[in-house]
């Protein structure tokens, strides 16, 4: 074989001593161009097929009577040749022997190529595993940082929300006292402003309560009291609660609950909040004389609930973000309809705390379908 320095090197031999090998290697180096040409041309030579060099030197130095030299030429990497000879003058090399050695040399070349490719693949795999391990450690570290930041955010929201409740209670209480006339009669202009203070205090208190609920669910401080309940009953109660708003806009509320997806495991109070938020949103964004349908069907071990409206729809780029805190879709209706952007975030947390998931399918101008899953009883 040719070494890294392009010198002929012995890789394997049978029948020669170390002293013999020194002499043989010196011989091949002396006539290297001849043997390099055999390798380049991939030409097999022997005592029967002709040899471009006096055979007696081969016979004397390599101590053989007859021989075959066949190149070993893998596609890449080191190349060389296979030398086979016999000392026995009674042994004659035939064409069949030469063909056999040619096949053997070709197989050796292929084996070397396979070994090279295997080593290359193995090294690539080792490098890939190393990179995957590095990325895994990096992702784990980033995830830990995200979890820390998320916990800090949750703790901060919880703390601030608690702190806001005390002054809010005081503001609302004093406004109620003044409105009740317990401190004397007040002018109409003052009464109107106090009513605004009272109304906005209620809105702010509602937002604070939603923030507290989200932070409690995120931190695991709220446990869903799941029990077997009738989905149809919950939906009908919610529809009845929101029927006044629906009648004001002449919107029809339709229910289609599949009996196979009627018994669910859920926390009644929490899941009622989900329906109030989702149906309430549908009422806000559905035009007069519209239709809102609440339906259910089984989906493996879950009941899938779909709330479909024929309202203004949600743009594709906003359909993931609407379930995040404080996100509101940028459209003319949202500019008119007040909101905090917390309702759908709270809904997502409640549904996920039940082991379900929530998503939306919508098309601008064609309405929306909010779907979520709850475990079947």
Image (tube, rainbow, N blue to C red):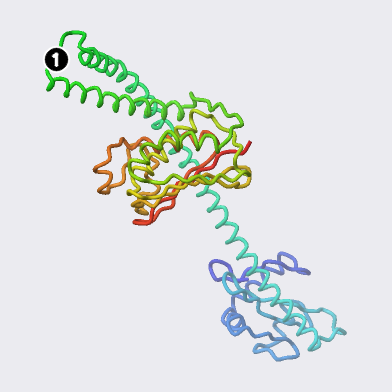
The residue positioned 70% from the left and 77% from the top of the image is 105
Say which of 7 and 224 sits in front. Answer: 224
Say which of 42 and 248 sits in front. Answer: 248
Residue 100: where, in percent of width, then height?
A: 77, 81
The residue positioned 49% from the left and 41% from the top of the image is 137
Residue 74 falls in which quadrant of the image? bottom right
Image: 377 above or below 19: above
Residue underneath mark 1:
186
Residue 256: where, in percent of width, then height?
A: 53, 46
Q: Secondary structure at mark 1?
A: loop
Query: Is residue 135 at least partly visible in the picture?
Result: no
Residue 8: where, in percent of width, then height?
A: 61, 71
Residue 220: where, in percent of width, then height?
A: 49, 26
Q: Is 167 on the left-hand or right-hand side of 224? A: left
Say which of 224 and 14 sits in front. Answer: 224
Image: 209 above or below 301: above
């Amino acid at each position: 074989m040719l070494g890294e320095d392009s010198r002929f090197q012995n890789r394997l031999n049978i029948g020669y001593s170390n002293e013999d090998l020194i002499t043989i290697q010196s011989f091949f180096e002396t006539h290297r161009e001849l043997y390099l040409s055999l390798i380049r041309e991939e030409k097999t030579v022997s005592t029967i097929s002709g040899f471009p060099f006096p055979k007696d030197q081969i016979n004397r130095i390599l101590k053989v009577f007859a021989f075959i030299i066949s190149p070993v030429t893998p596609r890449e990497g080191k190349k060389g040749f296979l030398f086979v000879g016999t000392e026995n003058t009674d042994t004659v090399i035939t064409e069949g022997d030469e063909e056999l050695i040619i096949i053997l040399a070709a197989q050796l070349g292929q084996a070397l190529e396979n070994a090279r490719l295997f080593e290359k693949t193995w090294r690539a795999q080792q490098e890939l595993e190393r990179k995957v391990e590095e990325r895994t450690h990096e992702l784990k570290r980033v995830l830990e940082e995200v979890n820390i930041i998320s916990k800090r955010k949750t703790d901060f929201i919880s703390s601030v929300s608690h702190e806001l409740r005390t002054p809010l209670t005081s503001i609302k209480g004093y406004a109620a006292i003044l409105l009740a006339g317990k401190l004397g009669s007040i002018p109409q202009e003052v009464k109107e402003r106090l009513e605004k203070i009272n109304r906005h205090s209620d809105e702010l208190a509602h937002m604070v309560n939603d923030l507290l609920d989200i932070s409690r669910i995120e931190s695991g401080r709220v446990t869903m009291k799941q029990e077997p309940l009738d989905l149809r009953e919950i939906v009908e109660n919610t529809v009845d609660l929101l029927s006044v708003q629906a009648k004001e806009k002449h919107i029809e509320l339709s229910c289609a609950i599949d009996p196979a997806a009627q018994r669910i495991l859920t926390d009644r109070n929490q899941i009622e909040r989900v329906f109030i938020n989702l149906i309430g949103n549908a009422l806000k964004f559905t035009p007069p004389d519209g239709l809102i349908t609440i339906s259910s069907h089984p989906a493996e071990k879950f009941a899938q609930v779909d709330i479909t409206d024929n309202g203004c729809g949600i743009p594709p780029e906003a359909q993931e973000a609407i379930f995040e805190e404080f996100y509101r879709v940028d459209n003319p209706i949202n500019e008119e309809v007040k909101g905090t952007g917390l309702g759908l975030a709270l809904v997502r947390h409640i549904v996920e705390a039940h082991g379900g998931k929530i998503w939306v399918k919508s098309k601008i101008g064609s309405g929306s379908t909010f779907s979520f899953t709850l475990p079947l009883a």
